[in-house]
Image (cartoon, helix red, strand yellow):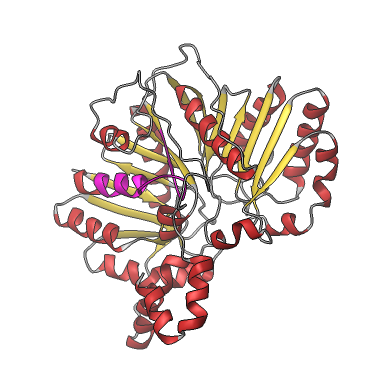
Amino acid sequence: MIVWLLFMIIFPYIFILFYYFFGVRKHSSKNEKNSLNLKKPSQISSSHPIDKLILAHNIAPASSNNDLTLYTNSQDAYAAFMKALRSATKSIDLAAYVVKIDAVTEVIFALLLKKAKEGVKVHLIIDAFGSYKLYLWQQPLRELRDAGVVIDFFAPIFSFKNITKLNLRYHRKIFIIDNQTLFSGGMNLSSEYMGETYESDRWLDLMFEAKGDIVKSYVDVFSSDIAYIHNQKTILLECMPGRVGEHLLQALPSGPDVKGDALLEVVLNSIYTAKSKIWIITPYFIPDEFILQAMKIASHKGVDVKIITPRHSNHAIADFARSGYIRNLYEFGIDVVLYEGKMIHAKAMLFDDETLILGSSNLDYRSLLLNYEIVTISYAKEHIEQMQAWMKSLIDAKHTRLRDAGRLRRIFENSARIFASQL
């Protein structure tokens, strides 16, 4: 808000118009985007404080009827994902921020085409801005559409309906097969994220496969997104899985279609209540001031706070903008691990030995306050231990700290924080 007020004072007429196009953060009415209501009356929350906090936002409580497999290897993730796609008999619902035409997606598209011809219902949601090249040149999608595959671009750039929502991007990654198997995490559909063979320049990322009650929550979110795109009423499907496992999991959607900022509240609450450990891995580190202050307080209490992020991400502007935040954390003895290896695209937050947050959300303004996102919270010990081991391997690998900066550079870095909320 400070940024917008500053611009409106300097260039009043221009930036009042800009605010109309880019300043809206929440849908103003239920008619614009069907509000998500994932809570079942028959469910009660667990004793975990995060579960109670989420339930207050009218979002479904955690369920122990789940089985989740976590993939930290891109080849393993790809193999499991393709196996599930091949097994589809009724429906394939895919949603991603980035879809690129390359060797990996050519194989995926060929399989989707085959399944569509076999009578499987295939639906694909792609963010128009995140996949702007494919949005502007949709010829590679023609054969899929001719075979009956429904392909929707979320918030089309040239649509008058979305003119005031150009800044609200669809960043969710949802891959659902037969309404029974779910894949999600940080991976989009491109060879940058997954593939059959090892690639030296492929990004480090996470994906998980899940069955059970958690799938129902993702199906509901996907159904709501489809309804918004087609200006229809949300139809929530009945998805009643049998007993599949004992992992305690919870889905947490966030964004313009969710009242309040439940994800931000969960992150803040987890930082404040952590007793021993806060380990966070994120490709882009541009936290809001509340999170930054909470981390400082946690550090004062003796909590081990570590931020793992790539030394060089794929967005140089974001790297520059984060510098002021990182130097500020250095002053409070907080360890920011600038990983020297591949680009890290994984998103995960580990709090003590109790809570693991996985999904599409980065630790930045855009993910926490602007984008459509969805994460899964796992309270299962085996997932926490697996993630802790993977994070430790990155911490122990080659990493650096920011070099000391002169006064002029510090001024520019701190000034960049003014624009950080829009990066």
At horizontal 61% and vertical 38% (from top left) the residue drawn is: 232
234 and 192: which is toward the camera: 234
Residue 86, percent from left and from top: 72, 25
Residue 6 appears left or right of 214: left
At horizontal 23% and vertical 69% (from top left) the residue drawn is: 331
The answer to whether any part of residue 129 appears in the image is no
In the rendered image, the vertical position of residue 332 relative to residue 270, given as above or below: below
Q: Find the residue positioned furthest to the top.
A: 242
Query: Residue 403 appears in which quarter of the rendering?
Result: bottom left
The answer to whether any part of residue 292 appears in the image is yes
Residue 236, percent from left and from top: 53, 27
Query: Residue 417 appears in which quarter of the rendering?
Result: bottom left
At horizontal 30% and vertical 22% (from top left) the residue drawn is: 44
Task: Work out which quarter of the rendered image holds the N terminus and state it.
Answer: bottom left
Residue 63, percent from left and from top: 37, 23
389 and 377: which is toward the camera: 377
Residue 113 appears left or right of 262: right
- Membership of 333 in magenta stretch: no
159 and 288: which is toward the camera: 159
Bounds of the magenta segment: 251-270
Looking at the image, how many numbered discs can be counted on the residues?
A: 0
178 and 311: which is toward the camera: 178
Residue 109 appears left or right of 253: right
